[in-house]
Image: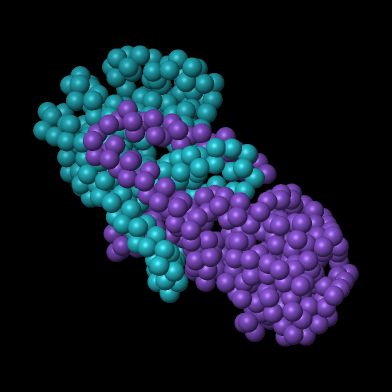
Chain colours: A cyan, B purple
Amino acid sequence: MIISIIGIGLLGGSFALAVREKYPRAQFIGVDASPVHGQLAIAKGIVDEIRTFDEAVAVSDLIVLAIPVNAIADLLPSLLDRVPDKATVLDLGSTKGLICQAVEGHPKRAQFVAAHPMAGTENSGPGAAFRELLPGKNLIICDRDKSRSDSLKLAEALFRDIGMKIFYMTPQEHDLHLAYVSHLSHISAFALGLTVLEKEKDEQAIFDMASTGFSSTVRLAKSSPQMWAPIFDQNRTNVSQALADYIEFLQQFKQVIDQQDVTTSLEFMQRANVIRRVLEGIEKR
Amino acid sequence: MIISIIGIGLLGGSFALAVREKYPRAQFIGVDASPVHGQLAIAKGIVDEIRTFDEAVAVSDLIVLAIPVNAIADLLPSLLDRVPDKATVLDLGSTKGLICQAVEGHPKRAQFVAAHPMAGTENSGPGAAFRELLPGKNLIICDRDKSRSDSLKLAEALFRDIGMKIFYMTPQEHDLHLAYVSHLSHISAFALGLTVLEKEKDEQAIFDMASTGFSSTVRLAKSSPQMWAPIFDQNRTNVSQALADYIEFLQQFKQVIDQQDVTTSLEFMQRANVIRRVLEGIEKR
């Protein structure tokens, strides 16, 4: 079996490393806009060889799109136009609405599987990829009924074999939930980073006074802008609503603090404490 | 030497455990409003015995206040009124302005040292205390010139001996910086937890779709409301300004997303990425 990874970064690279461990005789082709990333991916053992996009598409059984979501949406229709009948196309993008819409009604739609692994770190590039990123994590497949059964079976088999648990939903449900449980966390961290950097012009002062709590909360502000700008753009309706809800809570909190209403401040935090139950589940996973 | 820990929680308990390791023959007395916390603190080896507040004050060389900041500010003047001449009083509270102000001009002000260790976790109580919390972290002492030299020397020696690095500043500088690098992170996490819990009524859905990124960003929402409500209240002017700055950045970000201005969105995140340098320093510490 020949698997092509289009975009050999954190996610594409980690997927390849995990699948290679289970299927050591599968052949992996890498395609990447950056020749350096290609070299690093070969040196790390992520892929066996680097080929052009056209060469990779012509020979692959499975083509995995692990590039920014705007590039996936742009590329997918023309990729399906010329994909061989035997092949399956799989995307790992963090939004699903516009990507699924881009190939809605396409004559080869059934060869495409829309997936999103609930995993990531704030780092990017092939150097950030690691075999343990995906095992034990959850995966969402959208519009499963629009994929043909052998394509779906191949994708599901690989995800299950590397230890992922699969959930199914519509692209609309996916994008709405993700705006809250993922996209919003990233924006809150980016804005926190900006606020502190703006106020504390002296980075040494932040360093001296910040504790691990700050470090944990702002960690996602290290994430790749090139990856996240298109996600926020594609999911802007949901992200905008999530941000409006978040700003509303912050404004309420601010008002409570300004009014010295310690009782309501306590209540706010006690309600938020419920998140402990959820987090304990995530951390045990 | 007899050291009393008033409030045997995460911070008081961790301080005692670290100091005990360096000074195994020092005697530790615990004072806590909760009898159960007292039992647990003895069982864990944090303190040797539990005494009433009055008993502890009468016999101690060092009295460490590790209770919520409002309780510190309330208690401190009357504690100083009757503290023996030989004793030093040390507080570990997360705000310094109102606490220092509460004893400004007090005849025994010089026996008091105002300190704040830049360390914590989202957990509380004696069960959460651990010997490694403070070593390697930074500590701020405020208004050092107002403490007499032997009291200051004792506090500094203990903090240095357990591996902390000491910084000095005014209470006003402390509270302003901390509003940005600590208090704001906590509010952003509490509000994020509330926003997601409010939207996703089904906790299982959050669990299924959240990744470690969400978990990291929202971790501080597990923090103790009883500890944090008084901190936000005491530091409300600075916290309110920090929140206003943060909300302003979030609103700008929202507008950029609503307007599909991907270029400015990229720029925002690239500016926030600068935080990586700072965080690498904190994580290496």
**Which quadrant holds the C terminus of chain B?**
top right
Q: Relative to A84, say whether B21 is above or below.
A: below
Q: What residue is at 49 percent from the left and 23 percent from the top? A: A41
Q: What residue is at 33 percent from the left and 41 percent from the top? A: B252
Q: What residue is at 68 percent from the left and 74 percent from the top? A: B76
Question: Does residue B54 show up?
Answer: yes
Q: Relative to B75, say whether A38 is above or below.
A: above
Give the x, y percent position of residue B139. Answer: 70, 53
Q: Relative to A43, say whether B104 is above or below.
A: below
Which image quadrant is residue A87 in? top left
Question: Does residue B137 show up?
Answer: no
Give the x, y percent position of residue B235. Answer: 53, 61
Q: Nearer the viewer, residue B159 or B154?
A: B154
**Which quadrant holds the N terminus of chain B?**
bottom right
Q: Nearer the viewer, residue A39 or A258?
A: A258
Give the x, y percent position of residue B164. Answer: 74, 52
Give the x, y percent position of residue A30. Answer: 41, 21
Seen in the image, is A202 located left or right of residue A4? right
Q: Nearer the viewer, residue A100 or A85?
A: A100
Seen in the image, is A28 located left or right of residue A56? right
